[in-house]
Amino acid sequence: NVTAGEAVFDRIGCENCHTDSITTAPSGTVFNGGFFTVNGALGSKTIRPYGDFMLHDIGTGDGIPQGKATAAQIRTAPLWGLRTRTRLMHDGQSLTITQAIRRHAGQATPTVTAFNALSAADTANLMSFLNSL
């Protein structure tokens, strides 16, 4: 059940980084010291990427410090389109959703612990939800 799976997703903490929706800045908002201004077509739009696009330490960083990112951090990838992917995580090392979830560590350790404790029914519902994205 997809709806029940989304509730599991939220309950175990996946939404802490894989945020369901983001609303863009209002039209006319200026970024980068005036280099970019949000136009009317893009202003105040809500998208559902299931990712916050922020830097997090989940134990699988690429080892390369870059800008504000430490060697241990990666930018949260959106989960939209997850069902079409054959390789998961930023490095493509996970071949299944379960592998990808279990590879999370660092800030995501409590979520992985909660995932590992799910009942078979909750796990099936969560997978139904993730495979709907």
Image (cartoon, rainbow, N blue to C red):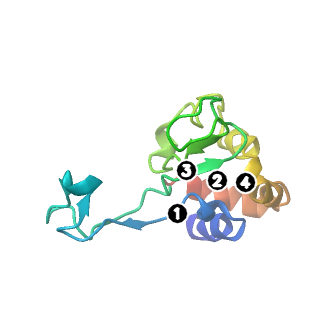
Q: Position of residue 5 (x, y in %)?
A: 63, 64
Helix, strand or loop under label 4: helix
Q: Name the residue under label 4.
A: 108
| Kind of residue at disc 4 | Ala
Q: Which residue is drawn at 55% across and 31% down?
A: 86
The amino acid beneath tag 2 is: Met
Q: What residue type is labelled 3?
A: Asn
Given this view, does label 4 or label 3 mark the residue nearer the observer? 4
The tag earlier along the polypeptide, 4 or 3, is 4
Q: How far apart are marks 2 and 3 (CA)?
A: 6 Å
Callout 1 environment at 10 Å: few (<14), some (14 to 19), or many (20+)?
some
Q: Name the residue under label 3.
A: 131
Mark 2 or mark 1: whose residue is earlier in sequence: 1
Q: Is mark 3 on a helix, strand or loop?
A: loop
Residue 127 - label: 2
Left or right of 93 in this view: 75: left
Residue occupying the point 56% across, 35% down:
90
- Residue 111 location, x and y as percent? 75, 58
Seen in the picture, residue 128 relative to 105 is either above or below; the reply is below
| Discs 3/1, front | 1
Q: Splitting the image into 4 quarters, where does residue 31 fall?
A: bottom left
Image position of 7 (left or right of 53): right
Please provide percent x and percent y for residue 96: 66, 37
Circle 2 Cα neighbour tier, 10 Å, few/some/many (<14 / 14–19 / ≥20) = some
